[in-house]
Amino acid sequence: MKPTLIIFLSVLFNFSVVAQTKMISLAGQRTLKPIQNIEIAEVIDVRDDKSNIGWVQKGLNNKRIQIEFAAGLKEELKWFLITNAAKEGKKVPVIVKVNKFSITESDIGDIEYKAAEVALEFLAQETGQPLYCLLLQTGSSLQTTTLTSEAGGHANLLARVLEDCFTQFSELNFTDLCAAEKQVPPSFLEVNTYNKVDPQTIPMLAAKTPQSGVFMNFQEFKNNAPGYSEVEVTFNKFGNYFETYSGKKIKDFWGYSDGKKTYIRFGGKPSLLFLTKRKDQFTFVANVTTTDKTAVAIGSALGGVAGGIIAQGLTANTHAIEFSIHPLTGMINPVPKARDETDESKISKIVVYRNSKHEKPEPLNIYINDSLAAEINTRAYSEFIFNNSSSEKNICVEANERICQKITPVQGQVLYLQCNLSVKGDGKPVLKRVTEKEAEYYLKIIKYFQSKNPN
């Protein structure tokens, strides 16, 4: 295998100088564990765009250049598996159909944001049979804010996503791979299923009710199979993280279900946001902090978790943005806005602010309709935007106790709420409706303070 590796590295070196294309390779990428039970008989590429595997930015002007594999997608996939396959055990020869295989990159300032997304199908054909067996339809994604200038950074991201997909296949029950209900015609090999997922093939979408418990990753959520059942865990007193009954804190979980509703942990904090089940996907609403109207576009352009994390570091202004989760890969992206949603006359705003006079320094949590929407410190404010909405909202602030106000947004208007947590008294927070004149007075002070103390 050494000569093959030398060829790969040689190709990578020779092509890396091409002006408009950045070349990467999976050569040298290693999985955490050997991949079991699989060898690639054929790779079928049905991606919508086969000209590259994505786009990255380069230089001070963020010039977009395409990114491509040094030896082509099919050869890179085969080499990756040969390099990382277990040396012992029976191998199942499979056809790998590639529906999605992409790298995306964006940056603000000196920080680089990358995402990898892959959607694969594993098929087999028995000798003399006209039909194919669909063994597994799956996908995976990974979004990171890790800064790296090395080409290997993108390759490593793809390698981790591929490892997830191949590991899912290796964990199948191989006693009855070609059941009759999994057979598909030859024409299926030409169909890109990433763009039109059958909800019945996604257990969480097909289920009438979700299994209760804690999902440690997207795959557990997709398969409606929580890593911790509800009887194994308990909420902490604030209801924003879990621990086992033995007292072990459950870290880095993906989401949660109470058996009726499902929630996602989003934005780098233990915030549980309610997931809405659509016909072919799940969506949720999260607050993205912005400097102005253009900052929402900046966050959206970054995509997924990265966009949300970036925007949260810009300012104290927040906007409610709807995100979608791809049912195969788990990729999180902002839902494209309808054209008229930017019409100021068709949106309503609620501003919640907090000054610093006689205030405890600890933050207050803001909930909207029982979903944790934001965290507000002293001398700060959050702005919530509702599109074409006139329904009543239950807005709460919480410290040791939750205090709520029911308020109905009005199109074309801004409504104001003041919250406080006094150093005196019983430790209960205060939330009250105030006039625009009173709110503007305190907001002017808060904005002045923020301008002098940007960090």
Image (cartoon, rainbow, N blue to C red):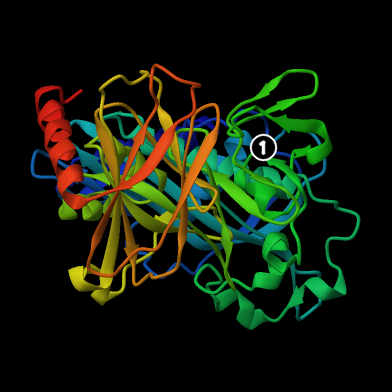
Nearest to the observer: residue 374 or residue 17:
374
Which residue ends up furthest to the front in the rendered image?
425
Figure disc tally: 1
Residue farthest along the right direction in this orientation: 175
Q: Secondary structure at mark 1?
A: loop
Camera sees residue 167: yes
Question: In this orientation, which residue lies closer to the viewer: 421 or 12?
Answer: 421
Residue under pointer 1: 85
In percent of width and height, residue 107 lies at 23, 40
Q: Is residue 98 above or below residue 355?
A: below
Left or right: residue 234 compared with residue 450: right
User: Within the image, what quadrant is residue 338 found in?
Assistant: bottom left
> Measured from the top left, where is residue 63 in percent x and y?
13, 49
Q: Nearer the viewer, residue 152 or 116?
A: 116
Image-based side of 264 in relation to 380, left or right: right
In front of the other: 184 or 396:
396
Amino acid residing under circle 1: Ala
Q: Residue at x 54, y 58 (%)?
A: 119
The answer to whether residue 291 of the structure is visible from this angle is: no
Residue at 76% x, 61% y is 209
Q: Quadrant of the C terminus?
A: top left
Q: Quadrant of the N terminus?
A: top right
Horizontally, is 39 left or right of 445 in the view? Answer: right
Residue 93 x, y percent position in the rendering? 73, 55
Q: Is residue 331 above or below residue 193?
A: above
On the image, the x and y values in percent for residue 257 come to: 69, 48
> In the rendered image of this protein, does residue 406 appear above or below residue 37?
below
